[in-house]
Amino acid sequence: MNPLQSILLAASVTLVAATQAATTPPQSHPGMNSAAPLQVSAIDHVGINVPDIDTATRFFSALMGARVVSDISPGKIPDQWKSQFRWHGSSELQRFVMLQMDGGAKLELFQYQGSEVNQVQPHGDDAGASHVALRTADIDGSLATLKRLNVSILNEPITNTDGVRWFYFQAPWGTQIELVSLPQSVGG
């Protein structure tokens, strides 16, 4: 498995480790103090809205060895669902594809169309903007591969005081993706 194929392999582990490393307890929502916590053990998948699902599928398949595990064109979505899920009235879910990397990490890609659907990726500091952080054991090799493939690199790797190294790159449609490398003593 090449370094980029292993990137998503540890995405769930990265997020679980970050959760375990948190030093402050989460703030509870008013009225939820008596509720038992959900029994969550890992992140199953991350969903990303994309303007062209075929382009996105090819990108993740070629770059990270992702394989399609489901590909669904759902047909007309009921207006009640649009209201429940805060979709635009004109929105139609064209297709969604589940991709899986070696090791089990998954990305779910969604393609919506409609006159009210904004196809422009939000700025990184806009509410609702997000990114996916993926772990790699070879951040320098991953960076070299991305540069060789002319993928847009947003910054050179930065090393934190704790030894964690990271940088961002951008998918062709604008989604920001972070690659993270942990120090050897932490399991990176």
Image (tube, grey):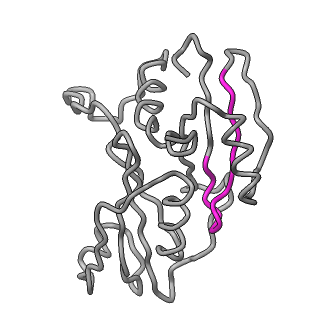
Residue 59, horizontal then vertical, whole percent: 55, 63
At 51% from the left and 45% from the top, the residue drawn is 5
In the rendered view, does 49 fall on the left or right side of 98? right
Vertical placement of 185 versus 27: above or below? above
At 65% from the left and 63% from the top, the residue drawn is 174
Residue 53 is one of the magenta-drawn residues: no
At 19% from the left and 27% from the top, the residue drawn is 36
Vertical placement of 41 versus 155: above or below? above
Residue 172 is one of the magenta-drawn residues: yes
Residue 53, horizontal then vertical, whole percent: 47, 73
Q: As drawn, which residue projects farthest toward the right?
A: 156
- Judge by depth and name the residue closer to the eye, 82 or 97: 97
In the rendered view, does 96 fall on the left or right side of 2? left
- Judge by depth and name the residue closer to the eye, 180 or 20: 180
Residue 14, horizontal then vertical, whole percent: 47, 31
Q: As drawn, which residue projects farthest toward the front?
A: 1
- Judge by depth and name the residue closer to the eye, 21 or 149: 149
- Residue 41 falls in which quadrant of the image? top left
Vertical placement of 148 versus 93: above or below? above
At 27% from the left and 27% from the top, the residue drawn is 33
Q: Which residues are magenta?
A: 164-177
